[in-house]
Amino acid sequence: MNLHSIFSAINGSRFSKWLISSYIFDWICILIPGALGRIFKTVEPNKHAFYLRDPNISYPHVSETVPPVVLILVSLLAPAAIIALGSLLFIPGRTAEKHAPSALVWRRKLWEWNAGWMGLGVAYAGTYAATEGLKTMFGKPRPDMLARCKPDVDDIATYIIGGLAESLRDAPALVSWKICTAEGKALRDGFVSFPSGHASMSFAGLTYLTLWLCAKLSISFPYLHPRTFSTDRRQTAFVTGTTHPTIDDPYTGPQSDPSSSSTSLLPLRDQNAAPPAYLLLLAAFPICTATYIASSRWWDNRHFGFDILFGSALGIFFAYLGFRLYHLPLGAGAGWAWGARSRDKAFYAGVGLASYATVMDGSLSSSGAAAASGRYSSGPPHNNKTNGLVVSRAGNDAGPADEWAHDRPSSSRGVAEV
């Protein structure tokens, strides 16, 4: 595969500048929260008042186990590289025939790559903006705040803003942050304990990577397929000339009585099985890495336990949000990302239109004409409804269609061709 073939795959006859521009705009919108988080990081946070005798903020200041550079490398750059490499090497998987058109193969690879990165972008940028925004608003002192602050203990009375020290002997005095003699970044960093950025960012990137690996490597709890056996054509990656009708298939019509064929029914226990244990270890590795990074903030005296737990939950939330926006569920999607929007809904769908993937009359925007006409069929047509299908045992739903395609004729119906 040379560069000319790759670009031909993207810039084919069904190339839609309008649709591509909508996804470019999506990328801009994804990067905006990241830029907002960076702005929050430069803003002076609220600095909560504190007691000089508070043991919770009297821990020594020590060096970090996981510096910020390592955090970015492990939680963002490594997942991005793995997603890119995995999309190029392992997509489209076993559902594709050997002689599938190279343009179709590269459309699938590039779309899965793009969808994988978009989900990661949502997870990471959203977490970053939320984390830095909360840090700025709360201004919570770190466990090592006094070591950073270097308070002017000779002039405590000037900075007392609360407590009973002025009326009761030896009572604790609540002082303002202005008692600190330290300045600049050292002082600012002493008041951004909540939530833990290392915990939130590591769990955002690495939880997303775990979900992505589970999708692509078919790692999930065993589940029952919606058809009698796993020949649901919606699982396919490509349109071919093979037809695998199933019982009561809505496209092929009712089939013979299940009892009349020994292959019509399959026992429930034989319809799925647990994934190999080594794959579970592989999927768990990113989560374990995130746990280590988050835990290091405790013994480095950077955060309290609640800060770490909340940051971890925040990262997991955005990781799941990013994954589900662009990928089908682990228990029903065969590992595929959702397909692209239809051209007429590239920027907006409106009330009453449930799917962004269909044209205005409800037909599948990305597959109908190709499936009906057998555009990529490798064998003789069977009929207009079943020609151009292939079976996979990987999951429940078809992969996305020709992601950058113009809308097909609205009268056509069919399953995704990519």
Image (tube, rainbow, N blue to C red):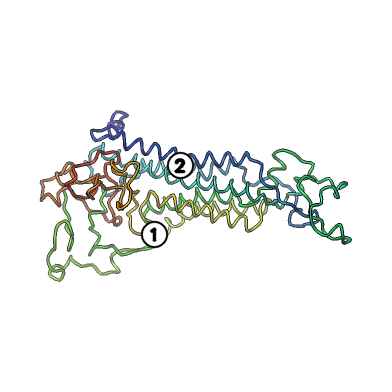
Element type at marker 2? helix
Element type at marker 1? loop
Between 25 and 59, which is closer to the camera in this rendering? Answer: 25
Q: Earlier in the sequence, mark 2 or mark 1?
A: 2
Estimate the x, y position of residue 8 in percent, counting from the top left: 27, 31
Contact (Cβ within 8 Å) of mark 2 with mark 1 = no
407 sits to left or right of 114:
left
Between 219 and 305, which is closer to the camera in this rendering? Answer: 305
Estimate the x, y position of residue 62 in percent, counting from the top left: 72, 47
Would you call the spot at circle 2 few (<14 residues within 10 Å), some (14-19), or many (20 or more)? many
Where, quadrant-wise, is the N terminus in this rendering? top left
Task: Give the residue pinned by disc 1.
Answer: 220
Residue at x 30% of width, y 51% of height: 355
Q: Quadrant of residue 417?
A: top left
Estimate the x, y position of residue 102 in percent, counting from the top left: 25, 37
76 sits to left or right of 84:
right
Q: Quadrant of residue 221?
A: bottom left
Disc number placed over residue 284 in the picture, else none: none
373 sits to left or right of 237:
left
Estimate the x, y position of residue 230 in percent, counting from the top left: 25, 60
Q: Residue furthest front?
A: 351
Where, quadrant-wise, is the C terminus in this rendering? top left
Residue at x 61% of width, y 51% of height: 196
Task: Give the residue pinned by disc 2.
Answer: 30
Label total for image: 2
Query: How far separated are the C-alphas under marks 2 and 1?
Result: 28 Å
Amino acid type, callout 1? Ser
Amino acid type, callout 2? Ile
